[in-house]
Amino acid sequence: MNLKDQLLKAGLVDSKQARRATHQQRVKAKQQDRSLSENEEDAAAEEVRRQKEQQKIQDQALMARRNEERLAQENRLAEKAHRESEIAEVYRNGILANWEGPRRYNYLLGTRIESLMLSDLAAQKLEAGDAAIVAPRSGQGSPVVISASAAKKLREVAPEQVIVFFDS
């Protein structure tokens, strides 16, 4: 037996008041259920908002990292293009005229002894440190002879290209 039935039996409340009390209890229970579900919905909405904000922050960080990588790549390409431009200028402006001739000039390339046919003037300049033997620009073909000033510039930009240079 519940409290309502006990109160009715004791005559403390009439049936109308008992129904009203029961109705109020149901309404109160529904309101509590609604407020709980609203709180759950609010909590779920807050969680979704927080996740979206966190995703936005992660996306921004990823975008910033990609931009940094892209800029670094662009800088590397620009530096490479600048280096290639400097090398081309050295070869264009530094090659000695009429350097080929009848004199055999032997030099060491790695572990091999190579030879290059030079003019007497080119050989004298080479031995005096006024010229240098450098690898061919394209990497194929035979080495060429360039002036000492061009060799110094090439040694700064691409030291691997300079084969023989008696810098004094």
Image (cartoon, rainbow, N blue to C red):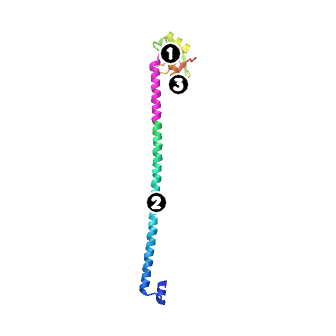
User: How many numbered discs?
Assistant: 3
At horizontal 47% and vertical 25% (from top left) the residue drawn is 86
86 in magenta:
yes
C-beta proximity under 8 Å, tags 3 and 1: no
In front: 158, or 123?
Answer: 158
Residue situated in front as seen by the camera: 137 or 90:
90
Mark 1 / mark 2, whichever is N-terminal: 2
Say whether residue 158 is visible: no
Q: In this figure, which residue is indicated by the disc labeled 1?
A: 116
**In percent of the image, x 46 and y 53: which residue is there?**
53
Q: Where does label 3 land, which residue?
A: 156
- Residue 46, numbered label: 2
- Tell me which amino acid carries mark 1: Leu
Q: Does dot 3 land on a helix, a strand or a loop?
A: helix
Measured in 3D between alpha carbons, the distance from the residue under mark 3 to the one under mark 2, in whole angstroms, is 61 Å
Compared with 80, 58 (above or below) is below
- Is residue 100 or residue 106 the one in the foreground? 100
Residue sitting at x 45%, y 61%? 44
x and y percentages locating residue 35 in the rendered image = 45, 69
Image vertical order of residue 40 relative to residue 11, above or below: above
Kindly identify the amino acid type of the residue bearing the numbered disc 3.
Glu
Classified by dominant secondary structure, the portion drawn in magenta counts as helix
